[in-house]
Image (tube, helix red, strand yellow):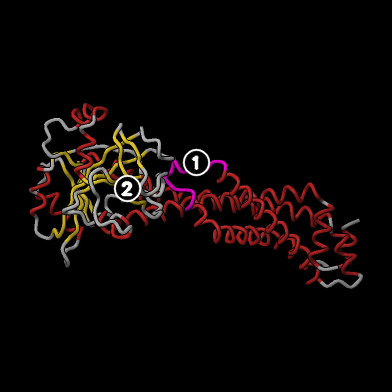
Amino acid sequence: MSIIGIALRNLTHRSVRTCFMVLFASVMAASLFMSSVIVRSVEVRLENTVSRMGADIVIVPKDAASDTVKTLFAGELSSFYFDGKEADKLLNMAGIGKASPQLFIATLDAVCCLQPTQIVAFDPKSDFIVKPWLDQLHVSELKKDEVIIGSSILAEAGEKIKFFGHDFIVAGSMAKTDTGYDNCVFMDFASARSLMESPILKNVMARKTAGMKNPISAVMIRTKEGTEAGPLATKLNYTYPDTVLKAWTRNGIFSSLSESMKQMSSYLTFLSAISVVLVILSLMCIFTITVNERRREFGIMTAIGASKAQLSSVIAAEAFVIGAAGGLFGIVFSVIMFFVFKDVITVKLGVPASLFAFSAAFTALKCVGASVAVSLASSLYSVCAIVREEPVNLIREGD
């Protein structure tokens, strides 16, 4: 019989104890897997958002930075406004290559979408962010009441979708980006202003934009070649400290989210380390108890010709089986939990389920490997204890 076969028979003979050992390994593997996948998924989403943003600097009201992050990162609804003339003086600063305004309109009344929809209006004359997406969709320009939609919006090109009682025609659908843009609808300013005049929205917008001749939500800026975004943003903020606006670099506006991610990653790493230590100690205690109970068995095996290397291999094989089984069960349990609670996780963290799959495969292998390694490490003391003993002592102490 092979070493693995002997190990399996031994573990089956002590089924209750084996189940507890596998359970310990499963809990550790599940905690490592779930924390790693969630952290990596959020990191990938953040990286995608930063690279997809398309602007080096974004100018928004000072109290709207967090709302901007929510819109760009998770596609959450936001609607904040300032008068476009507030930004005019900032845009005269040397080093600015291109500048284009955007307008955010939040909507909950669309029947087209799995999630709340954020409408983003852009200026076709100055835009440098949405136009490249139009080129990819082979759309030269958006006509009045035409829109392009994110991948999460349930509509096809040529179909009509309705916002605030106003019909729009879908000119194209963007490829999946795994960013907040997947939940957005893009239209030009002419269509947005028509929408703002609709009976359903007119009074709401009048209150939010009272006294504004040219309400906008953000100004996207691309710097001139050779101009660094960081120093330019700082210069904009310090030159006009009394303005209601603030300039952020694309990395800077997500800095709070990045810091939160680092903190969450640190906490999860700490908790995972504690989990690993506790599992090692638990398995070590159980292995020690098990091996002490089997000293006579090991002594007889040695007496009839089994080498100490073979005895060590049997113990190591049992540890390997426990670690592998625990790791696999832990991964399966985690995948089931992700499937059951994916909508909750998606809403709470703003991370689409597709990114879980993106991060999961390699992480699963690492977690199973970690489970096996921890189980083998836990058996080392027992292996050393058996190797040091003489067969006659093992048989005598087993009586």
* Residue type highlighted by circle 2: Leu
Between the residue at mark 1 and the residue at mark 2, the CA separation in whole angstroms equals 19 Å
Q: Quadrant of the N terminus?
A: bottom right
* Residue type highlighted by circle 1: Asp
Element assignment for label 1: helix
Q: Is residue 100 left or right of residue 316?
A: left
The main secondary structure of the magenta stretch is: helix
Residue 111 percent coordinates (x, y)? 40, 35
Q: Which residues are magenta?
A: 340-355
Is 51 situated above or below 17? below
Q: Is residue 67 at all visible to an observer of this figure? A: yes
Q: Nearer the viewer, residue 143 or 93?
A: 143
> Does the stretch in magenta take in 141?
no
Query: Which of the 4 image quarters holds residue 164?
Result: top left
Contact between marks 1 and 2 (CB within 8 A): the answer is no
Q: Is residue 299 left or right of residue 162?
A: right
Query: Which of the 4 image quarters holds residue 202?
Result: top left
Q: Is residue 171 left or right of residue 246?
A: right
Is 68 situated above or below 13? above
Element assignment for label 2: helix
Q: How many marks?
A: 2
Residue under the point 91% across and 56% down:
399
Residue 343's disc number:
1
Give the farthest residue toward the front.
158
Read off the residue under disc 2: 72
